[in-house]
Amino acid sequence: MAPATVRPFTTSAQRHGNMLLRPARYTRVVLPPMAARKGFGEPKRDQAKRPEAPPQQQQGPASTSGNGSGPAAFEAAQSGGPVPRTRVVRETPQVVVDRMFRRILVCTGVPVFTGMALFPLFYWLRVVQDIDYPLWIVYIAQVLTFGGGLLGITYGALSASWDPSREGSALGWTELQANLAILLNRNKN
């Protein structure tokens, strides 16, 4: 038997006729268990497995190229069978990931901690020094610092050298231009 559902924050008021004896208080209500399905629609059934095609005979070195573009792939596509494909998995080297992480920490941390340091500074100026300044100055300063932190994530990832053998420059402007060109031209091929 499934356990009962408990809703801990249900309000109830005790009444006697039209008079309210006690104000509303929080009580625990125990609900009976319900057998409800999760998700939408019909549950997914195991998809029927396609019958595997009989192994094809090798006709020469051109059909065993393994890149999915030889005569075997062409014949499989013409016959309606599955087309053999190779899967290319690219991993970012750990050196590049560490380099990106360091730059993201610096490019994000400096503006965010500056924005957090501005809160007590504005308070000190208003309360202790009794300087009146418009509130929009505080808003603009916070938007610039925390927005700079958001942009720092992107700049930190794109300004790191993606070449594992090359460290890159301190500011990373040339790496940013090269990596941005790679990123924008990736979908055009």
Image (cartoon, grey):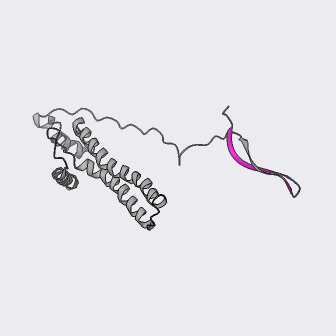
Residue 131 percent location from the top left of the image: 44, 64
Residue at (26% x, 38% y) in the render? 98
Residue at (27% x, 33% y) in the render? 54
Between 116 and 40, the one lying in front of the other is 116
Between 21 and 18, the one lying in front of the other is 21
Residue 48 covered by magenta stretch: no
Residue stretch in magenta: 1-20
Query: Does residue 41 lie above or below 58 as drawn?
Result: below
Residue 135 percent location from the top left of the image: 45, 66
Residue 23 percent location from the top left of the image: 79, 52
Residue at (21% x, 34% y) in the render? 56
Query: Does residue 146 lie above or below 166 as drawn?
Result: below
Total residue callouts: 0
The reply to whether residue 72 is in sight is: yes
Residue at (24% x, 32% y) in the render? 55
Between 13 and 134, the one lying in front of the other is 134
Residue 85 image-quadrant placement: top left
Query: Does residue 165 lie above or below 183 as drawn?
Result: above
Residue 52 image-quadrant placement: top left
